[in-house]
Image: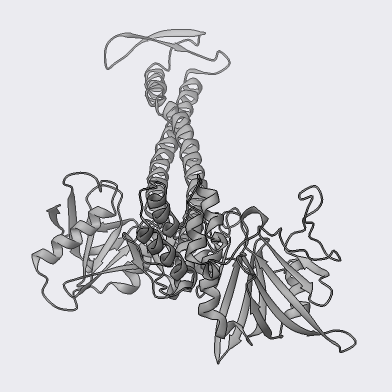
């Protein structure tokens, strides 16, 4: 993952300058200490400007789907959000400035104070790694009104940030403008020894970072020092073209590890700079959130399974008492056959079934019949306990199977919405924040095979919705045989289905199964009308008239 650099910010501002300038702030939200959303309107269009100052994911872009980023708006707005609402809500952005070579975006506003005097305010969005911040200050005297988080003397000796303090820019680094540098001056920089950092400053790369793919490519040539003047001139022009945004081609590496505003080999082109920023950071941000939530659910599910297995061990000991119950009944039956015997502390009586002697302990205060009844009661009590234990073990086995199924669903979940659905199914609403999904809002992954639509349910909520709302009686249902897997529905649309389509559907069912890496596994399929939901809180099913295919 690479950082959001000044060149990317420059490209973003250039692309969105016409919208940002004169846009009115309709609403302000602050999902967390490090996130702010400005709802803007301009040219008859509404957009959400998302500002993230998390040291790991600091960036700025317009976003569309808040839920896709797992952004949760608190019921009570934080203090900084209230401050922004007081000063800049319902006002217009009068100017948009990026100080030269800085990862700072300044949005200027006109504000009328209590005396109805117009005051110019500036919202400085500083995207500088662990020093990222959002600062609101007065333009006329540079006095800070408030910050997303204050920076005291203990954190920085050179630059304190807090309300009533003067706003000071970060220390200047004697940057020159590569667009104004002559080639002869640029060439002089390579006459002596240099390292990566000196190279970056030599070409005024405050619009760049050394992690930028363009710089990496240039450095791979420069480090060899085996280049002629013509080659160096081409490097010089490439840097100038990039910094001047002459050939902007936003792109993202296939594995989402890097992005670039210039298309590179192995990079996928994206339509706009904003789309590049949004897609790249939302993916990496969501992956981290997803992994954290998955880890919590794994821990919870494993703990519940461990507790159930512990209960099962106790109950298994109860099952071993089944023989003891039979012994109680045998002794009671023998006593009833010998009611004339004298009551002693212990009697040795003949077992009518084997002819062997059986010793029976008696209570001398009771008669033979009463002792027999006492053994019948012990038999009944022990038998009831054994039956209860047997039923409980069956229930525990079912619960363990459900939990193992849910663990599999956690494993294949590809977004936060699916994880939240599983969280809700497990009844963890209080432990993990979950957005309540209406049935109409459930999103099912869909594939298209030779014109047929194929749907995949990745958890119990989706499976239930798939079977009850999407599938028609004659549609085909697929599932791995006797193993954890997803429900797959092929929409037939009253048309005959070729065997090749069925095979492709079976491959999808295998892909989302526990045995996806096995060479071949059996996949069953049948018409949806032959699939019935079992009486369980999750979507276990029974089926008939099934066919089997290996893939």
Q: Is residue 107 left or right of residue 263?
A: right
The x and y percentages for residue 485 are: 30, 53
**Is 330 located above or below residue 532 in the figure?**
above
Image quadrant where residue 120 sits: bottom right
Q: Is residue 186 left or right of residue 511?
A: right
Q: Residue at x 12, y 71 (%)?
A: 497
**Is 378 located above or below residue 362 in the figure?**
below
Across the whole image, how many numbered discs are drawn on residues? 0
The x and y percentages for residue 438 are: 48, 72
Q: Which one is in front, 72 or 457?
A: 72
**Is 87 located above or below residue 538 in the figure?**
below
Residue at the right extreme of this rendering: 115
Q: Which one is in front, 503 or 267?
A: 267
Q: Which residue is drawn at 44% across and 40% down?
A: 392
The x and y percentages for residue 343 are: 50, 11
Image quadrant where residue 47 sits: bottom right
Q: Residue at x 48, y 26 (%)?
A: 378
Q: Which residue is drawn at 50% across and 56% down?
A: 188
Q: Which one is in front, 11 or 544?
A: 11
Q: Can residue 435 be seen in this view?
A: no
Q: Is residue 450 left or right of residue 198?
A: left
The x and y percentages for residue 29 are: 66, 72
Q: In this view, does 474 lie to the left or right of 2?
A: left
Residue at the bottom extreme of this rendering: 44
Q: Is residue 168 visible?
A: yes
Q: Which colour scheme is used?
A: one colour
């Amino acid at each position: 993952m690479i950082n959001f650099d000044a060149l990317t910010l420059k490209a973003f501002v250039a692309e969105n300058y016409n919208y940002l300038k004169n846009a009115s702030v309709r609403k302000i939200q602050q999902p967390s200490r490090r996130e702010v959303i400005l709802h803007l309107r301009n040219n008859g269009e509404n957009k959400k400007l998302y500002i993230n100052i998390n040291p790991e994911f600091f960036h700025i872009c317009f976003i569309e789907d808040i839920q896709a980023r797992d952004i949760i708006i608190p019921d009570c707005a934080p203090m900084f959000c209230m401050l922004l609402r007081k000063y800049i809500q319902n006002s217009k952005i009068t100017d948009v400035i990026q100080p030269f070579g800085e990862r700072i975006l300044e949005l200027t506003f006109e504000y009328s104070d209590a005396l109805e005097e117009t005051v110019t305010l500036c919202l400085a969005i500083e995207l500088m790694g662990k020093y990222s911040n959002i600062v609101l200050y007065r333009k006329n005297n540079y006095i800070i009104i408030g910050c997303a988080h204050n920076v005291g003397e203990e954190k920085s000796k050179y630059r304190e940030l807090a309300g009533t303090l003067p706003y000071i820019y970060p220390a200047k680094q004697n940057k020159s403008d590569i667009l104004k540098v002559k080639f002869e001056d640029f060439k002089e920089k390579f006459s002596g020894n240099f390292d990566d950092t000196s190279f970056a400053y030599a070409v005024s790369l405050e619009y760049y970072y050394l992690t930028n793919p363009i710089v990496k490519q240039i450095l791979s040539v420069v480090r060899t020092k085996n280049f002629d003047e013509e080659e160096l001139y081409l490097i010089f022009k490439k840097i100038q073209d990039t910094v001047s945004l002459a050939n902007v081609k936003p792109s993202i590496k296939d594995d989402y590890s890097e992005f670039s505003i210039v298309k590179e080999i192995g990079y996928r082109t994206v339509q706009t700079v904003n789309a590049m920023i949004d897609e790249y950071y939302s993916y990496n941000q969501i992956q981290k959130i997803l992994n954290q939530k998955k880890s919590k659910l794994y821990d919870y599910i494993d703990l519940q399974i461990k507790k159930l297995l512990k209960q099962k061990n106790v109950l298994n000991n109860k099952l071993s008492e089944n023989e003891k119950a039979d012994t109680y009944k045998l002794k009671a039956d023998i006593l009833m056959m010998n009611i004339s015997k004298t009551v002693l502390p212990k009697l040795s009586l003949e077992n009518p079934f084997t002819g062997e002697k059986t010793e029976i302990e008696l209570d001398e205060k009771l008669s033979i019949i009463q002792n027999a009844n006492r053994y019948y009661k012990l038999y009944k009590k022990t038998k009831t306990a054994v039956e209860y234990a047997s039923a409980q073990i069956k229930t525990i086995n079912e619960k363990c199977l459900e939990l193992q199924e849910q663990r599999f669903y956690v494993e294949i979940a590809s977004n936060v919405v699916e994880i939240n659905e599983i969280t809700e199914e497990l009844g963890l609403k209080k432990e993990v924040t979950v957005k309540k999904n209406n049935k109409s809002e459930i999103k099912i992954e869909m594939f298209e095979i030779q014109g047929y639509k194929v749907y995949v349910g990745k958890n119990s909520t989706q499976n239930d919705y798939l079977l009850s709302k999407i599938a028609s009686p004659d549609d085909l249902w697929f599932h791995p045989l006797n193993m954890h897997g997803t429900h797959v529905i092929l929409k037939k649309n009253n048309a005959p289905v070729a065997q090749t389509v069925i095979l492709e559907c079976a491959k999808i069912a295998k892909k989302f199964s526990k045995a996806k890496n096995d060479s071949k596994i059996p996949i069953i399929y049948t018409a949806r009308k032959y699939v019935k939901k079992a009486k369980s809180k999750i979507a276990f099913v029974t089926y008939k008239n099934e066919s089997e295919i290996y893939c």
